[in-house]
Amino acid sequence: MTDLHWLVRALLTLYPNDYRARYGAEMLAVSQERAGRRRWPGVADVADLLGGAARVRLTRVRATGRDERMRDGLAVVGVVAPVALLAGLADQLHEVAWYVWYGGFEGVSLRDVVGPAPVWLVWAVVAGCAVLGLRRVAAAVAWLAVAVMVGAPVVGLATAEVAMGGWLSLGLVAAVALTFAPRSGWAVVGGWRLSGVAGGVGLVLVTRVLGHHWWPTDLVAWFALGAALVAACRPRTAAGRRALLMLVAPAVSAVAGYAAVQLSVVDVYLLPWPLAVVLFQGVPLVVATAVLALRPPADGPVEVNT
Amino acid sequence: MTIRGVQEPTFLILTALADRPQHGYGIMTDVDAISDGRVRLRAGTLYAALDRLAGQGLVAADREEVVDGRLRRYYRLTPAGVATLRTESARLRSLADVAARRLINPAGGTA
């Protein structure tokens, strides 16, 4: 294998697999013929192969955005994610229940009792609007809720759950889905499946409030919510598989954050807020978005509306 | 299918395939010759264009052969490709005619 052969093959790995399978051998042959007796391809040839890979991938990302199955997936996420987000209220609801049960309000500020709960009340508005089909209003309020979550340290609502759990990225995914979905997800998901998600949320809230952080009941409740979410996405459909992929990043954030806290991998009180957000929210989101855009689920050719 | 405002490299690729099927390297050298060396296609640009044109139904793979262990796939214009090239060349000719007519008495006069 010559140096030119090796370098061109290495550059071809930047192209999508199917593109490389279709044109790779020809592109290599053409590059060799162009180079003649030179050992290495010219700088312009290398730049052209790099630019070609970027163009092909960019074209596919644009096509993904017009893919009907992706748009349906966005519609599904636009309704199930805001409803599922309400489970995030569980921890604070547990705190409030504690104050109520033991009557410990004396000398305690309302802010300490309520904590970050208002963020989830904003999400309740988003969920209500999304379920009622008021997609644009839901999207606007969702971005407000995301902004509050991102700015949580500024408004004094910073908690490890927001930085390291799956809530921030789930909120971001919900806001993006509501913004770009072409229609309300109610019709795609169906009332029964959405009720399942709401039931899962209710179970999480009840077990967290009454269960005193007893892990077996927590586990059952979270598992029930997860199962209801998967069922609501309808994983047998192409749109459902895309919707589930959109929810992978928040799920990874949630599991990674939980594992980091439980295994004491990091000290959540010492980890700087921006670093926690980048590590636990940003990285899974970027990876999942790249996978979804560049390697969508293989279920036939992409239907593009032009 | 028609494409509006075909870019020059695309127009040159369609032109290179107008009278016969050609393989990738043949298209490259032909475009180089047609454009008097102004447009030099390289592998990344050429195959991105061929992939797009095949997606638009303007070109199609014709046949394959292996020469010196290298794959040569020939491409040809489809009927839609012929129609597009015809439309585009008529458009360019009409623009060139207007320019030529107006240059008979140019506003700035001759130098």
Image: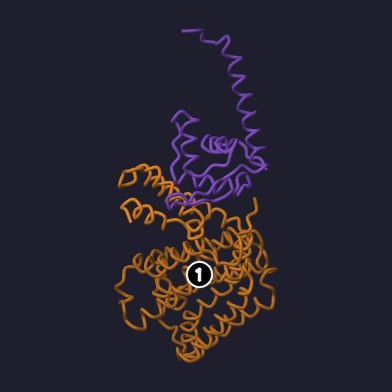
Chain colours: A orange, B purple
Q: Is residue A84 left or right of residue A267?
A: right
Residue A89 position, x and y percent, is 51, 77
A24, above or below A193, in the image: above
B98, above or below A181, in the image: above
Where, by quadrant of the figure, is residue A229 drawn? bottom right
The image shows a total of numbered marks equal to 1
Residue A5 position, x and y percent, is 36, 53
In what quadrant of the picture does the N terminus of chain A appear?
A: bottom left
Q: Which one is nearer the viewer's eye here, A291 or B33?
A: B33
Where, by quadrant of the figure, is residue A163 drawn? bottom left
Q: Is residue B53 left or right of residue A51?
A: right
The residue at 50%/69% (across/down) is A170
- In which chain is the residue bearing label 1? A
Q: Which one is nearer the viewer's eye here, A70 or A31?
A: A31
Q: Is residue A119 left or right of residue A128?
A: left
Q: Amino acid at mark 1?
A: Leu
Residue A102 position, x and y percent, is 46, 90
Q: Which one is nearer the viewer's eye here, B90 or A119?
A: B90
Where, by quadrant of the figure, is residue A47 drawn? top left
User: Which residue occupies the extreme front position in the image?
Assistant: B68
Mark 1 surroundings within 10 Å by alpha-carbon count, few (fewer than 14), some (14 through 19), many (20 or more): many
The residue at 49%/87% (across/down) is A219
The residue at 60%/74% (across/down) is A235
The residue singled out by tag 1 in the image is: A170
Q: Secondary structure at mark 1?
A: helix
Q: Is residue B37 left or right of residue A63?
A: left
Residue A46 position, x and y percent, is 37, 47
